[in-house]
Amino acid sequence: MGARITEAFAALGYPVATVDTAPGTPRQLLEVYPHTALLSLLAREIRVPYKVGKLNRYWRNETPGMRRELLFQELGAIEAGLTSVLGPLPIERPLPSAKVKTLKAFEDALDAMISAWVGLLYLERRAVALGDSHAAIWCPADVIRRMP
């Protein structure tokens, strides 16, 4: 996390939650990697291919139209998973014909919603910190228990 952002939040009374922070401790700043949370949310074992900028790398052997279709399937799965845990989302999925910029904005909104969900898990004491006493990434506890 950027040092200036961390310092600004700390000055407002929100220190960074680290491995030394008990899950559920109020007024903490959490660092979250949305992809780790997606493994829990979607009950997946491998990377979820949903990043718009990596579209061509995910499905190299597919046509551009099929790549978009596969991307929309993944975005739809994420949207459905978030809706199942958060209720109706305040964002609307763009049409498949949308410009890349619009798709990227939707991806970013989903990442924000995923991070918010991890924050809720943290407050419910169902998140685990990976890191040290200076910084940590917070993940759903069930993902960590499944790691080999």
Image (spheres, helix red, strand yellow):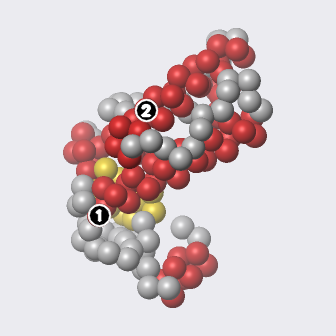
Question: Which residue is more in the foreground, 5 or 78?
Answer: 78
Q: Residues within 10 Å of mark 1 (few under 14, many from 20)?
A: some
| Residue 112 horizontal/vertical position (percent) | 53, 52
Residue 138, image x, y percentages: 37, 58
Contact flag, marks 2 and 1 (Cβ < 8 Å): no
- Residue beneath the point at 38% across and 60% down: 119
Under mark 1, the amino acid is: Leu
At label 2, the amino acid type is: Ala
Q: Is residue 98 above or below residue 36?
A: above
Position of the N terminus by quadrant: bottom right
Q: Earlier in the sequence, mark 2 or mark 1?
A: 2
Q: Position of residue 53 (x, y in %)?
A: 68, 36
Q: Nearer the viewer, residue 96 or 39?
A: 96
User: At 50% from the left edge and 85% from the top edge, which residue is drawn?
Assistant: 12
**Residue 47 seen in this snapshot:** no
- Tell me where residue 23 sits by quadrant: bottom left
Can you say whether 126 is above or below 66 in the image? below
What residue do we see at 38% from left, 46% from top? Answer: 86
Report which residue position mark 1 lands on.
123
Q: Secondary structure at mark 1?
A: helix
Q: Quadrant of residue 18?
A: bottom left
Residue 80's label in the rendered image is 2
